[in-house]
Image (spheres, rainbow, N blue to C red):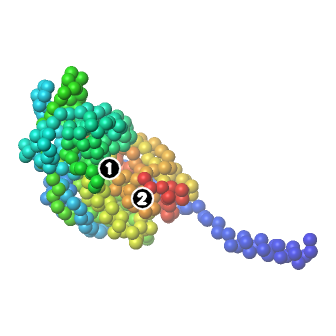
Amino acid sequence: MPKTLFKALIVGVFLIASNISFAKPPVLLTNSELKQVESVREQALNSNLSYEILESLTTEVGPRMAGTPQDTLAVKWAVKKFKALGFDKVWTEPVTYTTWKRGVETAQVVSPFPQPLHITALGGSVSTDSVFTSSVSSDKDGLTAKVIHFLNLDALKAANPSQVKGKIVFVSNRMERSINGMGYGKAVALRRNGAIEAAKKGALAIIIRSVGTDTHRVPHTGLMKYQDDTQKIPAAALSNPDADQLVRIFKRNKDVSIKLNIGAKPAGEFTSHNVIGEITGSTAPNEYIVMGGHLDSWDLGTGAVDDGAGVALTMAAATLIKNSGIKHRRAIRVVLWANEEQGLKGAKAYADAHTKDLEQHIIGAESDFGAGRIYQFSSLVTDKDIPFMDQMAKMLAPLGIERGDNKAGPGPDLIPLYKKGMSVFRLSQDGTDYFDLHHTADDTLDKVNPEALAQNVAAYTVYALMTAQYQSDLARPKEESKNEH
């Protein structure tokens, strides 16, 4: 090879090599920083702060349905509590939405075996006095009509409209119990879309077996939907024992009639607020580690499990980190979202309001699955950050929390931020009995185990403090960034 060509080749290789950027692996937490994490974790395990916050919320505010006076009271409570806990910054952001009022809700079997039924209107339902037809008795005292029974939503969809027209639809689909709540996803489609499908067939109303796993005579409410091109019909949920009773009646006599009285109605526009508390970061104060829960609840119970627990434990976790005196790099931001229950209204408003600083939202974790012990964590990071997750696994292991996969999905209120590209972290709670209480009058403080709640707080202190100290951007894998859940 000629010398000139050889020299040119060497120079070319040098120039190419000089332009290659060799990414350095992220700097993991030091032993000193890990000891700080251990210290705060142990303090959290021995602290009653989260239970005290939850007791305050459920006692001083109680039910916090969106659009009610207690919604406004909850916002004031949250601002005051954040300030009392010593958060560095506390502010609110407005959230405006259309509200709904429950009203009277009764039902009874008229024939063949007259008896009362325990029901609750589904969120967003219209009233029975909005149903008028010459073939049915309908007035301010309710409507009376024959009932047709279906085993599930698919059976309703497949039904001949002539079988359904002018009747009340009853669907007895049963939810399955599971530790991770996977049965909810299968069952909730009936609650959300049942009224649409029944109305398409000409039904006057729909009642469903509650989307829940309990055997108590308390029905489960929850949001339902209408379709603009379809008649709006009343929708209600039966308590599970009453649904079983109705099934038994149908086995004896297919000619069943029910009187249904629902007084629910829209209640105009309302402006509530997301409430945000922040612990300032030392060297990266404009980078945010996000956690929180939703401040609203349904009106039947006091919202202790859904989602007072999430509110209390994330507020407590940030407070314990603040009180430790540790100078963490990034800010820790606790967001209490407004009106999750009726359509993620606060979550959507927050994501829209923070579009310009979205890249500064490093990662988020939400607690909205009750107060059961956390048994597993999962992440959503690139390969370069897996060693950091290995460090976190060691910090969470003493709490009885196992390593999950790297395919974490967002909690409900994080969905809008997730869709815009933010990474998420999931701390999975034992939800075996969560849907015994979900959206019912049984969702009260006495159902919360203080020790399990403290374990949750300890896990969230590990998550928040470690990610606040870590120097990587914790970006999502590229293929995951394209997915919208």
Amino acid type of the residue that numbered disc 1 sits on in the rendered structure: Asp
Q: Label 1 crowding class (10 Å Cα cut-off): few <14, some 14-19, many 20+? A: many
Q: Is residue 335 above or below residue 123?
A: below
**Which of the 4 quarters of the picture holds residue 81?**
bottom left
Q: Which mark is residue 448?
A: none
Q: Is residue 329 above or below residue 404?
A: below
Q: Secondary structure at mark 1?
A: loop
Q: How many labels, in total?
A: 2
Given residues 449 and 243, the one toward you in this image is 243
Assign the N terminus to one quadrant of the image.
Answer: bottom right
Expressed as whole percent of the image width and height from the top left, the position of residue 445 reads: 20, 44
Q: Residue shown at 15%/53% (left/top)?
A: 265
The answer to whether residue 79 shows anywhere in this view is no
Expressed as whole percent of the image width and height from the top left, the position of residue 382 reads: 54, 57
Q: Residue shown at 25%/64% (left/top)?
A: 95
Q: Report if the CB atoms under discs 2 and 1 are less than 8 Å apart.
A: no
Expressed as whole percent of the image width and height from the top left, the position of residue 323 reads: 32, 60
Q: Label 2 crowding class (10 Å Cα cut-off): few <14, some 14-19, many 20+? A: many
Q: Which residue is mark 2?
A: 418
Asked whether, in this view, residue 84 is left or right of residue 358, the answer is left
Q: Which mark is residue 368?
A: 1
Q: Earlier in the sequence, mark 2 or mark 1?
A: 1
Q: Nearer the viewer, mark 2 or mark 1?
A: 2
Amino acid type of the residue that numbered disc 2 sits on in the rendered structure: Tyr
